[in-house]
Every structure is written in structure tokens, then in C-alpha cells.
Image (tube, rainbow, N blue to C red):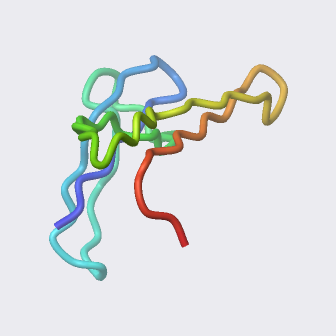
């Protein structure tokens, strides 16, 4: 059951919505101002990075402009890659 976070474009309030299945329909309105214009935001996560075999890699964060007044952030986590 995924939990999605959304930001209200009217007041900036961030809230979560729990979806129990892919066909479920819910009324997505801001809990603070009852606005119905919401945008999905990247959820905060917590993780631990361990060191193995002397690999001292650490996460890297890259932020770039992706539109007027907007930014996009990419987080690269150390570990196995394809």
C-alpha cells in the first residue's frame, strides 16, 4: 500500500494519501484549505549506508533547474549498479 505525499499549490501544505489498491478513488483535497490543486512531492526517506571492503562511497546529491522557479534533485546512493 503506497503512501504518496502531495503539496497544495494554494497554501503549500504537505500531506499524505494512502492508496490501498490501484483502482481506489479518493477525494484528494488539501486538509488545511480544502484546495484541490495538489502536486506530488518527493517523500523524505531515511537510510543507512554501510561500508564493505574499504569502499568509502557516500551519497551524492545533484540539483538542477527544471523550469522557471523550480528545481529537480537527484540522489545517487552507493552500492551495486547495473
Query: In the image shown, does 52 or 35 lie closer to the viewer?
Result: 52
In the figure, is residue 63 to the left or right of 6? right
Q: Quadrant of residue 19?
A: bottom left
In the figure, is residue 55 to the left or right of 17? right
In the figure, is residue 3 to the left or right of 44? left
Task: State whether residue 24 is above or below residue 45.
Answer: below
Q: Residue at x 24, y 40 (%)?
A: 50
Task: State whether residue 12 is above or below residue 18.
Answer: above
Task: State whether residue 79 is above or below residue 75.
Answer: below
Residue at the right extreme? Answer: 68
Quadrant of the frame with the C terminus: bottom right
- Please state the horizontal and vertical placement of residue 63, each as a whole percent of the image: 68, 28
Q: Quadrant of residue 58?
A: top left
- Please state the horizontal and vertical placement of residue 11, each as a whole percent of the image: 45, 17
Quadrant of the frame with the N terminus: bottom left
Query: In the image shown, does 29 or 49 lie closer to the viewer?
Result: 49
Residue at the front extreme? Answer: 53
Q: Residue at x 44, y 46 (%)?
A: 78
- Please state the horizontal and vertical placement of residue 77, each as a whole percent of the image: 45, 45
Q: Residue at x 28, y 47 (%)?
A: 52
Amino acid at each position: 500500500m503506497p503512501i504518496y505525499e502531495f503539496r497544495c499549490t494554494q497554501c503549500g501544505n504537505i500531506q499524505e494519501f494512502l492508496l490501498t489498491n490501484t483502482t481506489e478513488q479518493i477525494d484528494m483535497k488539501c486538509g488545511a484549505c480544502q484546495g484541490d490543486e495538489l502536486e506530488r512531492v518527493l517523500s523524505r526517506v531515511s537510510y543507512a549506508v554501510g561500508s564493505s571492503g574499504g569502499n568509502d562511497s557516500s551519497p551524492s546529491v545533484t540539483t538542477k533547474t527544471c523550469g522557471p522557479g523550480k528545481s529537480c534533485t537527484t540522489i545517487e546512493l552507493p552500492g551495486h549498479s547495473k
